[in-house]
Each structure stands twice: as structure tokens, then as C-alpha cells.
Amino acid sequence: MPKRGFFMSSKTKVGIIATLLEFCVGVMLLIGGIWALMNGGDEAAAAVSKLFGSGVIKLAFGVVELVAGLFLVLRVFIGDKLGAFGNILMIIIAVLWLIGIFCADVIGFGTGSAAAILSNLYKLVRDLIIFAAILVNVRF
């Protein structure tokens, strides 16, 4: 007799976890995009803006975050109806997130006190976890 409840197949668990990651990253990107468009922005948008010295870049980054987040959240509910376009968009999101990681976490890394270095390491690892969550949803 098959076991039920917590004893589901590992394939089912992986599917549920990937869907949950996709939804959470989508909501995070939606919030970051709205925040950037309200002239605030998450750390990645602020770092890109600071690096290039332009508020237009920050707004463009915010629009990309907003569209990417909307796409990810919709994909949880409607499935992968966009096919190859959806996969290309996920790859673009991954590349932009890497650029954000580089701008926000790598540039200027290792300067300051031990507490500042630990804070930078924490942010870097957090952003790499989000990057991994984005990569989980790329269909190779």
C-alpha cells in the first residue's frame, strides 16, 4: 500500500519546492520593481544606479524586476504557456541578477571593519541563494 502524507515521492517534493521558489522569487522581484519605480529600490537597483550615476538606469532596472516578477508569479498559476520565450526571459532575469550581485555585493567588497565584511558576505550569500532559486526555474 503506498504511503501518503509526508512520504510523497521525491519528484513531487522537488516540483512543489521549485514552484514555491518560483512564486517567492516572483513576489520578491515584484516588490523590488515597485519599490524601484517609487524612487526607492532594493540594494541591486540602488547599486546599479550608483555605479552608472543615473536614475534612468535605476528605473529601467525596476521595470525589468517588475516584469520578471509578474512573469514568475503568473507562470506559477498559468503554467509554462510561453514556451521558449519564458525560458529566454528566465535566462535574462538570471543574467540581470548576476549583474545586480556584482554591482551591489562584489564592488567594494572587503573594505571596512569585520562587521562590515560579515554584512557584505551575508548579502552576497543571500543574493546567491536567490540566484540559485532563479536558476532552478530555467528549463534547459
Image: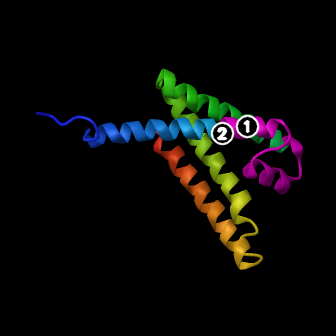
**How far, Cα to Cα, is label 2 from label 1?**
6 Å
Q: Name which residue lies at 66% across and 71% down.
A: 118
Q: Position of residue 16 (x, y in %)?
A: 40, 36
Q: Is residue 117 above or below residue 103?
A: below
Determine which residue is flagged by label 2: 29
Decide whether the magenta segment is chiefly helix, strand or loop. helix
The residue positioned farthest toward the front in the image shown: 5
Position of 12 relative to 117 (above/below): above
Q: Disc 1 on helix, strand or loop? A: helix
- The tag on residue 33 is 1
Q: Residues within 10 Å of mark 1 (few under 14, many from 20)?
A: many
Provide residue 90's location: percent of width, then percent of height.
56, 38
Check the image and report above or below for 139 versus 74. below
Q: Quadrant of residue 55?
A: top right
**Residue 88: assigned label:** none
CB under 8 Å between discs 2 and 1: yes
Three-letter amino acid code of the residue under disc 2: Leu
Identify which amino acid the numbered label 1 is placed on: Gly
Residue at 51% in and 37% down: 22
| Residue located 48% across and 38% down the image | 20
Q: Position of residue 26 (x, y in %)?
A: 59, 36
Q: Position of residue 107 (x, y in %)?
A: 74, 65
Is residue 99 within the magenta segment?
no
State the extent of the magenta-drawn residues as a range: 30-56
On-image quarter of the C terminus = top left
74 to the left or right of 17: right
Q: Is residue 140 visible?
A: no
